[in-house]
Image (cartoon, helix red, strand yellow):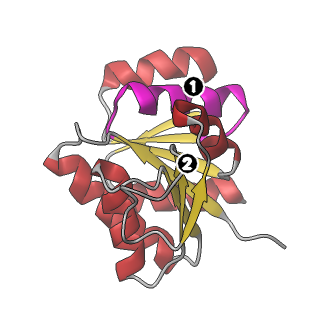
Amino acid sequence: MSKVVIGVMGAGNAATPQDLELAYQLGKLVAKQGWVLLTGGRKAGVMDAASGGAKAAGGLVVGILPSNNTVGMSEAVDIPIVTDLGNGRNNINVLSSNVVIACGMSLGTASEVALALKNLKPVILLNQSKSTYQFFAELASERVFRVETASQAIALVKELLK
């Protein structure tokens, strides 16, 4: 049986301090569940923070990299997947995840949320605005959820995986 893979997506260089703290907590909690963390793999923003949290808790981190090498990769990534696909890797991110958690928002994150919903993946919006939630809920209300804390996100993932 394959391992549960939790995709954590979020802003890179535009991540807020709150996004980074939540992503780090989320990474730790994902690892403590024995799940694999999947991110965009870069040493930037939510990707790096979530990866660092998972690594600090002894977890396994997969990074789906946009370029044709590992330059700029988070030091916390255990398994780099080099794609040379740029933003096209977003589809790999979501299709490889059992559940997608969006922590912070950017254009890239919005595309990942949309791709996940289009591919019938559940999406948890962590600490997102009501307007962001409403936008995605109008498109796929049965697969998009909104929570405020990393602990709430993990509890919801457990429910979704049942």
Residue 74 lies, with reference to residue 121, above or below; the image says below
Disc with the residue nearer the chain's start (2 vs 1): 2
Q: Residue at x 55, y 48 (%)?
A: 68
The amino acid sitting under disc 1 is Ala
The amino acid sitting under disc 2 is Asn
In the figure, residue 21 lies in which quadrant? bottom left
Q: Give the image location of residue 48, x and y in percent.
A: 34, 59
Specify start and end residues of the magenta stretch as a single range: 104-122
Image side of residue 152 versus residue 157, left or right? left
- What number is the disc on residue 68? 2
Per the image, label 2 sits on a secondary structure element best described as: loop
Quadrant assignment for the N terminus = bottom right
Residue 6 lies, with reference to residue 106, above or below; the image says below
Check residue 120 for magenta coloring: yes
Q: Mark 1 points at which residue?
A: 114
Farthest residue in the right direction? 1
Task: Name the one closer to the observer, 15 or 1.
Answer: 15
Q: Give the image location of residue 157, x and y in percent.
A: 57, 56
- What number is the disc on residue 134? none
Task: Name the one closer to the observer, 26 or 56.
Answer: 56
Image side of residue 89 versus residue 148, left or right? right
Q: Residue at x 33, y 51 (%)?
A: 46
Instruction: Say few, some or many: other residues with alpha carbon within 10 Å of mark 2 (under 14 / 14 to 19 / 20 or more).
Output: few
- Answer yes or no: is residue 95 visible: yes
Task: Name the one closer to the observer, 96 or 155.
Answer: 96
Image side of residue 162 versus residue 136, left or right? right
Q: Residue at x 63, y 61 (%)?
A: 5
Check residue 142 for magenta coloring: no
For the residues labelled 2 and 1, the Cα–Cα distance comes to 25 Å
Do callouts 2 and 1 mark residues in contact (Cβ within 8 Å)? no
Instruction: Say few, some or many: other residues with alpha carbon within 10 Å of mark 1 (under 14 / 14 to 19 / 20 or more).
Output: some
